[in-house]
Image: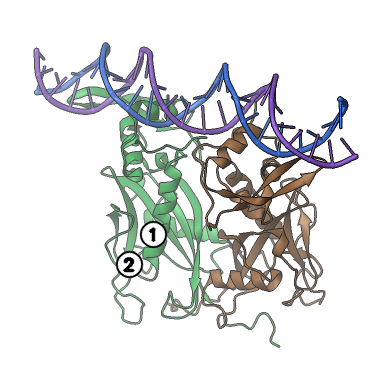
Chain colours: A brown, B green, C purple, D blue
Amino acid sequence: MRSSLDFPKPLVSVDVAIFSARAGLLQVLLVQRPLEADDPFPGLWALPGGIVDTVKDQDLENCAKRKLKEKTGVEASYLEQLGSWGSASRDPRGWSTTHVYFALMSADDVELRPGGNAGDSRWFAIDGPRMKERLAFDHADILKAAIARLRSKVEYTSLPAFLMPHEFTLTELQKIYETLLGRPIEKKSFRTRILATDLLEEVARRKEGANRPAQMYRLRNRRHPLFFTRALVAKG
Amino acid sequence: MRSSLDFPKPLVSVDVAIFSARAGLLQVLLVQRPLEADDPFPGLWALPGGIVDTVKDQDLENCAKRKLKEKTGVEASYLEQLGSWGSASRDPRGWSTTHVYFALMSADDVELRPGGNAGDSRWFAIDGPRMKERLAFDHADILKAAIARLRSKVEYTSLPAFLMPHEFTLTELQKIYETLLGRPIEKKSFRTRILATDLLEEVARRKEGANRPAQMYRLRNRRHPLFFTRALVAKG
DNA sequence: TTAATAGTGTCTTTCAGACACTATGTC
DNA sequence: GACATAGTGTCTGAAAGACACTATTAA
């Protein structure tokens, strides 16, 4: 009987699904796999991430934070673990596992960095439940799970607020909720629900346009989303 | 520059937090670590699990199912991934990761099996937010996260129904909800809420006692919990 | 009959949904 | 003034909370 330590070990990596709201749409940050032929999925787009470095990284979450910072230059306003994926088939190099994190951030403080061993990186708008783009590894499945998680939490949390720029109007926030839900929501209910909490605070600026200016708000300092006791329910 | 494949690889394991309701209490199944001195945490209690076998296991979920079946002899009525933990310090043998699954099952079809390399196994009742027992590795943290996940889902799902024996009364189900929530809930609201769905079906048997007999129910065949659109809210 | 638990009737409360209305800016 | 978008007033409806009430068994 062999000891528990001489099993062949799977590859261990960490990937991050980084979301932001840009141009009124949910967008995800993807990086292009290098074009070298010995690399799996050369040239395809993938979630940013890579092999865990057992010297640099003390734990998985710090590894995710490091990769996030390398890619975007900043820390995320919200980071949680999405889950882990592992199988014999997801990486052509052999049995592999990945620990996936889920990050929400303000588009306006990101400056994309080419760093790491990845080539280009860019934001992709998300429209339906999955992307049309073919992604490397099982990243299409992972991204689908990340989007599903975000969508389901929109019903009963303030999570979308972490996607907003630093200052925004209630209408802009509502638009993101509606984009994520894929359906319109009632203006009055939405405003009452949000303003009844201490989620936001007014700022002095107002958003001007060819119409009545709108009050701008910013997130009060919090790391965790608010949970509402009722879900938003489809009109019917 | 070294290739991405010659990094030293962490140890990869899968653990399962197996819950059931016994004697009106939430209970978790733990196994005792072997007493050999070269084994980490000899004699301490731990979540059942172990190293991923890249030959036997095609993916993480199947590995969890295998370990679950080895331990209990049956399949769980509910299985989901809880998350993953990985760090340089959680296992004295070096950088290690574990993928943790969360299983709910009927106590009445489990027959504990000593199998695997673990010694004794038994159910532990859970009272507060964590166990008093000292556990191996970081399993106390993991178990705490599992309990927190279960507790938070009780507010708006039918998850506790998966913990029940095959046939049970509404009062018994309510008691488990109350145990998990740590507070009483209104009988009428609870019954209306549950019976308004197709979660349960009546069975012919009734529970007899020194009082009015109670209708017994069983779970309609479903793998996923029901989600309610409102959370239960504390009395006050 | 009493004790004990099962199960119901019904009023209140909370908050989302609907939707018409008013307010305030630019042009 | 027209227009566009911000923001409010207020009614309805659905489901939880409160709590008193009735029902059915064994002993």
Chain ID, mark 1: B
**Amino acid tagged 1:** Leu
Give coordinates of residue B159: x percent, y percent. Answer: 44, 42
Amino acid type of the residue tagged 2 in the rendering? Leu
In the image, residue A229 above or below residue D13: below
Quarter that holds the C terminus of chain B: top left
Given residues B89 and A125, the one toward you in this image is A125
Q: Between marks 1 and 2, how big is the CA–CA gap?
A: 9 Å
Residue at far bottom of view:
B1
Q: Position of residue A196 (x, y in %)?
A: 53, 40
Residue placed most toward the observer, A185 or B203: A185
Please give left or right for residue A206 compared with residue B220 in the image.
right
- Asked whether disc 1 touches disc 2, contact meaning CB atoms under 8 Å apart, the reply is yes
Residue on which disc 1 sits: B143
How many C-alpha atoms fall within 10 Å of the one at disc 2: few (<14), some, or many (≥20)? many
Q: Residue at x 38, y 62 (%)?
A: B47
Residue A126 image offset from top left, x and y in percent: 75, 51
Location of residue B219 by image quarter: top left
Q: Residues within 10 Å of mark 1 (few under 14, many from 20)?
A: many
State which chain disc 2 sits on: B
> What secondary structure is found at the residue carrying circle 1?
helix
Q: Write the residue at 33% across / 40% down.
A: B178
Q: Is residue B38 above or below residue B79?
A: below
Residue B104 location, x and y as percent?
Answer: 41, 48
Question: Can you see residue A17?
Answer: yes
| Between discs 1 and 2, the one toward the N terminus | 2
Residue B55 in the figure: left or right of residue B4: left
Indicate which disc residue B135 carries.
Answer: 2
Give above or below for B79 relative to B33. Answer: above
